[in-house]
Amino acid sequence: MRHYTVHELRKRLDQDNPPVLLDVREEWEMARCQLPGSTWIPMGQIMARASELNKNTETVVICHHGIRSWQVAKFLEREGFGDVINLTGGIDAWAKEIDPAMPIY
């Protein structure tokens, strides 16, 4: 599994063929803030819904601080996903370092 900092993800999103952004936070967290274009599958549903994702697509997993996303990324790797990236620091780091207008919780 690879890891992106929020600065690396920002650069990657500006390139052609951006990755899938998989947000695994809870519904109340998504209501507070989210990255545009994210696919939302809460961590508790990922085992049942992993088939909704393409195993061959670069996928960046996002949560609040990067812990739940790391666990989901490890699971996806075990399920045969070939290009899974954990967002280090999560949406919290994104709000603090990239988008100061984004709510912090």
Image (cartoon, rainbow, N blue to C red):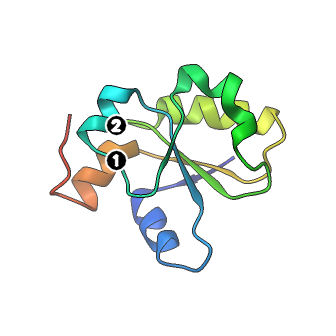
| Disc 2 residue type (three-letter) | Met
Would residue 71 be found to the left or right of residue 76 on screen? left
Q: Quarter-wise, where is residue 29 in the image?
A: top left
Residue at left offset 57%, top offset 69%: 18
Q: Which mark is residue 17?
A: none
Q: Position of residue 105 (x, y in %)?
A: 20, 33
Q: Which mark is residue 34?
A: 1
Residue at left offset 63%, top offset 27%: 46
Q: Quarter-wise, where is residue 79 in the image?
A: top right
Identify the element where label 1 is drawn.
loop
Given contact means CB atoms under 8 Å apart, are the residues at marks 1 and 2 in contact?
yes
Q: Which residue, given by chain and number where applicable, does mark 2 sit on? A: 30
Indicate whether 33 appears above or below 27.
below
Residue at left offset 34%, top offset 47%: 34
Q: Position of residue 68 (x, y in %)?
A: 50, 29
Structural distance between the alpha carbons of marks 1 and 2: 6 Å
